[in-house]
């Protein structure tokens, strides 16, 4: 699933002329879409793998804009899966989930669809948990930026040095 998402491109839904959600099959072909397209495809994959999963629409992020994501259950634990966060890695910082506010969702458990309307929830984050959650957040993001900066430096270095002609062994520098 992650390998496929790596090859996909995000397209903002604000300036779109089309106002429909792509079926997952169409998203597989175009590999381009907005958060809804990413979430619908991911939801279908999780359901196909046998996980109880929900396609969720609500508000998320720094500015509380409309967004879509997926939740699923594995080994008795519930996980928020953000299909567009694949560059960060397999884990999303738990403190980041506080920015997700579900409005409606659709659950699929085998052949049964269930529809939900969610109430606004208050954060039950205790101050004792905050240091551990901040450490987790820093750990995940520091690793992400180290990997990202390393890839950028290596990519730039390759471009710089691949364009430099190699000297022949019998040539002498002047």
Image (cartoon, helix red, strand yellow):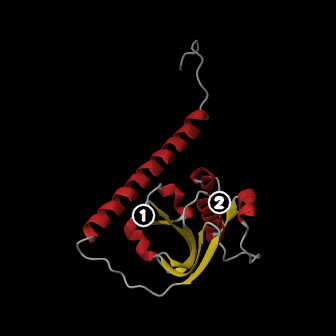
Q: Would you say the residues marked 1 and 2 are in contact, meaning their CB atoms lie under 8 Å apart?
A: no
Q: Which of 77 and 154 is in front in this view?
A: 77
Residue placed most toward the observer, 142 or 79:
79
Task: Give percent across and percent down for residue 109.
Answer: 58, 68
Q: Which residue is drawn at 71% across and 73% down?
A: 21
Q: Which residue is drawn at 44% across and 62% down?
A: 92
Q: How crowded is mark 1: few (under 14 residues within 10 Å), some or many (20 or more)?
A: few
Left or right relative to 44: residue 128: left
Q: Which of 82 and 71 is in front in this view?
A: 71
Quarter holding the N terminus is bottom right
- Would you identify the image quadrant in which residue 40 lies? bottom right
Disc 2: which residue: 9
Residue 48 appears in which quarter of the rendering? bottom right
What label sits on residue 76 in the rendered view?
A: 1
Q: Residue at x 71, y 58 (%)?
A: 28
Q: Residue 126 vs residue 32: left or right?
A: left
Indicate the position of residue 118 as horizontal and vertical percent values: 51, 84
Give the residue drawn at x 27%, y 70%: 129
The local secondary structure at tag 2 comes to: strand
Above or below, 111 relative to 173? below
Pointer 2: residues within 10 angstroms few (<14), some, or many (20+)? some
Judge whether 91 appears above or below 115 on screen.
above
Q: In the image, 139: left or right of 31?
A: left
């Amino acid at each position: 699933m992650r390998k496929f998402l790596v090859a996909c491109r995000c397209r903002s839904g604000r300036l779109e002329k089309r106002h429909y959600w792509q079926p997952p099959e169409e998203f597989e072909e175009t590999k381009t879409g907005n958060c809804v397209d990413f979430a619908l495809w991911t939801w279908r994959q999780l359901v196909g793998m046998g996980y109880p999963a929900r396609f969720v629409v609500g508000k998320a992020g720094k500015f509380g804009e409309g967004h879509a994501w997926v939740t699923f259950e594995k080994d008795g634990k519930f996980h928020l899966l953000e299909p567009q966060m694949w560059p960060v890695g397999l884990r999303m910082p738990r403190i980041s989930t506080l920015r997700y506010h579900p409005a409606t969702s659709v659950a699929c458990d085998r052949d049964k669809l269930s529809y939900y309307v969610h109430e606004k929830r208050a954060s039950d984050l205790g101050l004792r948990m905050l240091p551990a959650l901040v450490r987790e957040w820093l750990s995940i993001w520091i690793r992400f930026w180290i990997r990202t900066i390393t890839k950028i430096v290596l990519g730039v270095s390759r471009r710089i040095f691949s364009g430099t002609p190699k000297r022949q062994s019998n040539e002498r520098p002047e």
